[in-house]
Image (cartoon, rainbow, N blue to C red):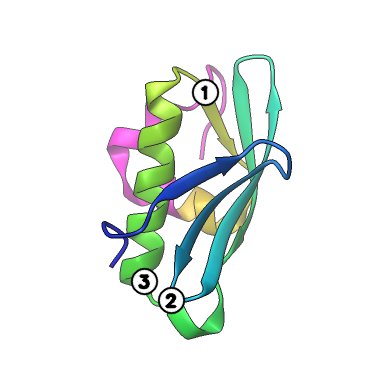
Amino acid sequence: MVEAAELIDNDFLRQFEIKIDNNLAKIEYSLQERKIFLTKLIIPESIKNEGFKKEFLALVFEQIGERNLSVVPTSPEIAKFVRSNRKYKRMLPVGVRI
């Protein structure tokens, strides 16, 4: 489902976006120094399922990893994803625990 869609980093609106069947899922963020704060996860009801959410978050984390940024998840849903995926915990800044 997510593989066919393109992940877009909308710098102007400060959000990662992915469009599925005319629905826009997004993760809002704030960028400070070498850290990206993931503040809000918005997924439309029509595509709301755990599989999509996990794939979308994984795509976003991969893109952030390519930029060598630290991640600070301030959204409870995103923090839960990091807790359940150990490989993304290494992307947390020093001193931040989830």
Q: What are the residue bounds of the magenta stretch?
A: 81-98
Q: Are marks 3 and 2 in contact (CB under 8 Å)?
A: no
First in residue order: circle 2 vs circle 1: 2
Q: Looking at the rendered structure, which numbered label has been put on residue 95?
A: none
Q: Residue at x 36, y 67 (%)?
A: 52
Q: Viewer-nearest of labels 3 and 2? A: 2
Measured from the top left, where is residue 36 in percent x and y? 61, 30
Measured from the top left, where is residue 80 in percent x and y? 47, 54
Location of residue 97 with respect to 54 vertically, above or below: above
Q: Which residue is drawn at 68% across and 28% down?
A: 31
Q: What's under tag 3, amino acid-wise?
A: Glu
What whole-number distance in Å separates the C-alpha atoms at marks 3 and 1? Answer: 24 Å
Q: Looking at the rendered structure, which numbered label has been put on residue 50?
A: 3
Q: Looking at the rendered structure, which numbered label has been put on residue 70?
A: 1
What whole-number distance in Å separates the C-alpha atoms at marks 3 and 2? Answer: 17 Å
Q: Quadrant of residue 74?
A: top right
Q: Are marks 3 and 1 in contact (CB under 8 Å)?
A: no
Q: Residue at x 51, y 52 (%)?
A: 78
First in residue order: circle 3 vs circle 1: 3
